[in-house]
Amino acid sequence: MGNPLTLTSDVINYLIYRYLQESGFSHTAFAFGHESSVTRTPIDPNNVPPGSLITFVQKGLQYLELEANIDSQDGEVDGEFKMLTPDELLCNNIDQLRMMVLDRKEERAKGPEKKGKKEKKEEKKEEPDNKKEKAQPSAPTPSTGPTPMEEDAAPSSSVTTLTGHESEVYSCAWSPTELLLASGSGDSTARIWNLAPGSNFSKSVVLHHEVKQDAKDITTLDWNQDGSLLGTGSYDGMARIWTKEGKLKQTLDKHHGPIFALKWNKKGDLLLSGSVDKTAIVWDAKLGEVKQIFEFHTAPTLDLDWRNNTTFASCSTDKLIYVCKLGETAPVKTFKGHTDEINAVRWDPSGKLLASCSDDRTAKVWSLSSGTDKCLHDFKDHSREIYTCRWSPTGAGSANPNLPLLLATASFDHTVKLWDVEAGKCVNSLEQHTQPVYSVSFSPNGKLVATGSFDRNMHVWSVEDGSLIRTFRGEAGIYEVCWSKEGERLAACYADHTLCVVDLRM
């Protein structure tokens, strides 16, 4: 960032952009990043620690406080340094602040007994606020990590770092059939990496997106069921379909705003996209044509998920969930209950239960067959916004039918919680992260769960008892983690333009 005392408008914009990301305002960050073009600035994210904006503001206030305490005659600070409140520092110029300091020094000179009960009460009242401020993630501390992860850290020989992207890597996904890893970045490219034994890991197939204007972010991607096609969605409102060799097959241009969600149906013949333009669109993947546009939401569509080959659920900042069916002109079901924007929806392996999570700090479970619009479960243990949720690949309809069905929720309160849906309670709270958790992913056998956070750590946990099994610490915040098809490799994508793949067999 260059000289830390020289704050250009680009630097300020970048600090605001990072603050929005770290605080969980991901969609606002996307919009601000696009309009301010901060992703084009030559600022290395590695040189910007978490909480930098708050740190700059705090240091600015401390500088003002110091300046107000400097003696105008000799330029020295006397021993009786007088503290000023943030309100006083922000609402007064330096001359007024100096007068306040002088007044307080004169009061002090009259004797300590002059301090009244009201002032002492105000001092006590401020103490909890100070403690709270120190606990905020925006106040950076040395990144040493918790003790258990030192013992269980992944050996460096098991880690492969993939470089090539020129901006943050927002998404990653393994092919369901082979060791191909796809990644999407803010540099207007997606890449396909071959991680098979004997492959050249340093090279990748680059999928260049000819984006509209400066909307470079590849926001989402998804493989079809047989791994032959990759769908990508971008901030320019266009969806694209590529072969696994990197050839562009279809360009799907109908949305009028950024695409935040993109999913293949189970058959692999239809692609579903959701956009800020409030719509969800089902595409014929072979023909590249619109099958149906669903215009039910009154605000941006944030996520969607197929129930089967023709029915899906969508959620929005309008706080509603719609279950829609191809060919139907009205929603099959509308679920109401969240009081803030809904960030994610997921069907369980059986297709009978739908999970949702929201900025209202709750996760809810819904059923189409319950005969009611009310949720079956309303999980309220998180203390901050819940960014995403995932079902375990267990229970009815899964490859692991003898294991209990669990729901995982990842939150900006730094925790991931595992919920037993049948019992309706939290069975484990995973609490080693120190920053917002953006991603959670179950291993294919349902026995492990991986979490990725902006504290730079990817943790692997035991689902059975919630113990920490393995940790890998990267060099920047993590946006997404995902398991390979056989469950032996774990990938994470980072804000420092890289991906890392950990081989858990080593």
Image: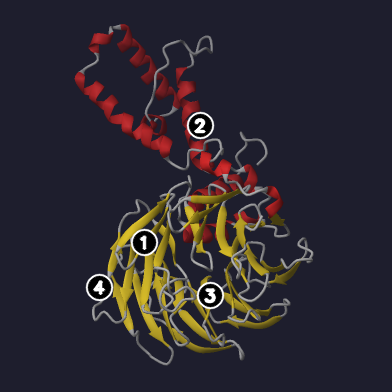
* Secondary structure of residue under mark 2: helix
Label pair 2/4, CB-CB below 8 angstroms:
no
Question: What is the three-letter code of the residue carrying label 3?
Answer: Leu
Distance between the Cα atoms at labels 3 and 2?
42 Å
Residue for badge 1: 419
Residue for badge 3: 262
What numbered label is drawn on residue 374?
4
Looking at the image, which is closer to me, 54 or 86?
Answer: 54
Identify the residue at horizontal 51%, vertical 37% (top origin).
Answer: 55
Residue, far top: 110
Residue for badge 2: 59
Distance between the Cα atoms at labels 3 and 1?
26 Å
Distance between the Cα atoms at labels 2 and 4?
49 Å
Tell me the quarter of the picture where residue 386 sits.
Answer: bottom left
> Mark 3 or mark 1: which comes first in sequence?
3
State the quadrant of the N terminus: top right
Q: Is residue 48 left or right of residue 386?
A: right
